[in-house]
Amino acid sequence: MNEPETYDFIVVGAGSAGCVLADRLSASGKHTVLLLEAGGEDKHLWIHIPIGYGKLFTDARVNWLYQSAPEPELNNRQIMQPRGKVLGGSSSINGLLYVRGQRQDFDHWRQLGNVGWSYEDVLPYFKKSEAQCRGSDEFHGAEGPLSVSDQVEPHEVCEAFIRAAEEVGIPRNDDFNGAAQEGAGYFQTTMRNGRRWSTARAYLKRARSRANLTVATGALTERVVIEGGVAAGVQYRWHGRSVVARARGEVILSAGAFGSPQILQLSGLGPAALLRQHGIAVLRDIPGVGSDLQDHLQVRFLYRVTRPITVNDVVNRWDRRMWAGLRYVLFRKGPLAVSAGYAGGFFRTDPRLASPDVQCHLLLFSADRPGGSLHPWPGVTASICQLRPESRGTLRIKSADPAAAPEIKLNYLSTEGDKRTMVQGLQLLRRVMDAPALKPYIAEERDPGPSVSSDADLLAFVRSRGTTIFHPTSSCRMGIDDAAVVDPELRVKGVGRLRVADASVMPTVVSGNTNAACIMIGEKCSDLVLRDAEARPRASAA
Ligand SMILES: Cc1cc2nc3c(=O)[nH]c(=O)nc-3n(C[C@H](O)[C@H](O)[C@H](O)COP(=O)(O)OP(=O)(O)OC[C@H]3O[C@@H](n4cnc5c(N)ncnc54)[C@H](O)[C@@H]3O)c2cc1C
């Protein structure tokens, strides 16, 4: 890269949303764009082979490897908080599931005053991004860059799981992103031909050939440079020294639910007392920066399966590993093309609810912890996560050093409603897993085991085993209330030419996996930025 210079737009973070912005903002050729990414190129082999997901949990080459602060309601355990640190961001290390959330989530965002974010408003952006393998329809697009695929082949345990759900009154659902989310079925994935389709692959790869896009990897953003109340550029660490790039148009933070509030706080935009505590000049007291952090708490049940038909059985035998490798190379099928969750479902713990409040993931493997060694016996995992948690956490810098990890507190399970929903969700999951269709497959529930059955015992199990399903959001929440950080056009309130576009702006976490919604946010933000650039042509002329 040449010496730092002036660009029309600077995008910080090449993750799910950031790669979309880099692509869309540079597409016309009219604007110069700088994309800054703290991580490196996405060359790691296991990024691209779906099952490699399990190997990236502890790999510092592609992962920030954050840990939460001790969680009071989870027996003071620290919870691992992986985040992608590589082109593609978390979309390069995630479980590949393509789930958008519920219609009601976006209508709720709109109901909170966020004009332009109802389901009807955001659906066109989901469709614009999507290359749906089943073709286009009312809910899906087929012309976008993001490949959305069906699982490469059915699996008999998943088939039995879907039948078991039907046996307890939960309908089969072949499209969680269609007319209704409720039901059990296979997940669709961000994959093409058995390979991961991160946003780096979907959006950035095609954009990188453009002369007006500069991508800087290994570039840790230290702060946004604010001059006269306006974002004038970005200071970042580049080959051991701090350099400044200036922005004629806008700076867009897409550094994720942990990165974006951290950068705002380092820039003097955040809770005044916290900033002063770390010797940072307060440019604007914005108490909401880093508050309202939300996440989906996940609890996993482990099952021993009656026959060696799981991924465990392949990974633990060299001859089956060889065969699986061959199948993958020749046909892009088999265990190497398995995403984190294979089948699953969206259930209501109370029939009076308008839409599902828990999600189940059925994994075709088992381990003591996410990313841990697979068990030496045939095993599957079935987990529950609560879709709309009431608990709120915080993200706060611990130091003025941009390279220091922030303090991440989720305060999981801090309301009675969250506790009740988790326990009821586990009871419902058990009813499905105990239903007749699964009897030929499930030899035993290994963890926690049938002796853990009362509400109190299940809650104790949640406290001792609960972990994240990796969906932190809302730490720079969008809204029209005083505590919101960005307005419904994603502009940081009170600061000119500075937006945030990533998981951190979600008013509430969506009822599902979060990657698709972050991509949608990137798509919508691109339109907002380009529209405003049109309105001030001199500021954004290349
Ligand atoms: C292990 C795991 C499994 C998951 N599974 C799924 C799944 O199956 N399906 C699903 O839908 N969602 C899943 N998610 C969640 C989903 O991937 C994330 O919500 C989504 O990718 C977040 O997008 P983002 O744009 O907010 O941030 P990210 O994609 O995390 O991007 C932020 C980028 O900013 C960079 N950055 C941060 N700070 C700085 C800085 N100071 N300077 C420069 N660059 C910086 C980061 O390195 C990163 O590349 C999973 C996440 C993880 C971690």
Image (tube, rainbow, N blue to C red):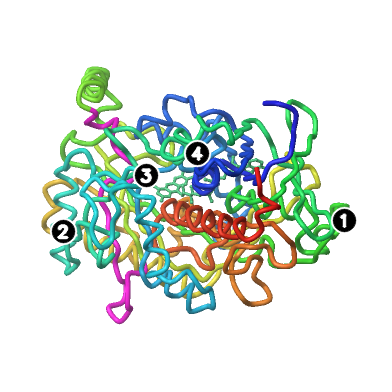
Residue carrying label 2: 164
Of badges 1 and 3, nearer the viewer stands 3
- Mark 3 belongs to which amino acid? Leu
Of badges 2 and 1, nearer the viewer stands 1
Q: CA distance from mark 2 to mark 1?
A: 59 Å
Magenta region's main secondary structure?
loop
Q: CA distance from mark 1 to mark 4?
A: 33 Å
- Asked if the stretch drawn in magenta spans residue 210, the answer is no
- Mark 2 belongs to which amino acid? Ala
Q: Earlier in the sequence, mark 1 or mark 3?
A: 3
Residue occupying the point 41% across, 36% down? 53
Tell me the quarter of the image containing the N terminus. Answer: top right
SS assignment at label 3: strand
Question: Does residue 183 appear left or right of residue 341 in this picture?
Answer: left
Residue bounds of the magenta highlight:
332-357
Residue 146 image label: 3
SS assignment at label 1: loop
Asked if disc 1 is less than 8 Å from ligand 1, the answer is no
Residue occupying the point 58% across, 39% down? 65
How far across and down, in percent of the image, does residue 328 sit? 25, 25
Of badges 2 and 3, nearer the viewer stands 3
